[in-house]
Amino acid sequence: MTHREEKTFTITLHLSAEFSEEYVGEEDGFVWHERFQEQVRPTLVGAVSEALRAQGHFRVVAAPRGRDPELALDLDLSFEPTPDQ
């Protein structure tokens, strides 16, 4: 029988934008958030994935847990020990 240990590590980003009093509301379609989704998010996801894979003993796969993948990044990270570990 194998022994399994589990832990959770969370990175949370709370996104916001502030505008002047002349701002007319959401008429711009949340352009600032769209910019995040198109430019920052892919780079961030790639950097996290690359950092995890670079360690050599970890396997990482996307693992959405019922949350919208546009709003959350869920990954399963498995430690793969060498024979001496």
Image (spheres, rainbow, N blue to C red):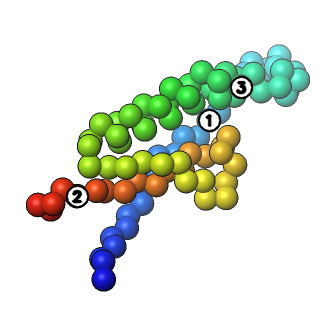
Disc 2 secondary structure class: loop
The amino acid marked with disc number 3 is Glu
Residue where numbered disc 3 is placed: 34
Question: Which of the two residues, 24 or 64, is positioned nearer the viewer here?
Answer: 64
Residue that lies at the very extreme toward the bottom in this rendered image? 1
Q: Estimate the spatial distance between the alpha carbons at disc 1 and disc 3, rounded to whole Å.
A: 11 Å
Crowding at label 1, few (<14), some or many (≥20) Cα neighbours within 10 Å? few
Residue where numbered disc 1 is placed: 15
Q: Residue at x 43, y 38 (%)?
A: 49
- Do the numbered discs 3 and 2 sit on residues whose CB atoms are within 8 Å? no
Residue where numbered disc 2 is placed: 81
Disc 1 secondary structure class: loop
Q: Residue at x 37, y 67 (%)?
A: 6
Disc 3 secondary structure class: helix
Q: Residue at x 47, y 31 (%)?
A: 46
The amino acid marked with disc number 2 is Pro
The first of marks 1 and 2 along the sequence is: 1
Q: Relative to residue 63, is residue 81 drawn left or right? A: left
- Give residue 47's quadrant in the image: top left
Q: Estimate the spatial distance between the alpha carbons at disc 1 and disc 2, rounded to whole Å.
A: 37 Å
Residue 18 visible in the current orientation: no
- Give residue 25's quadrant in the image: top right
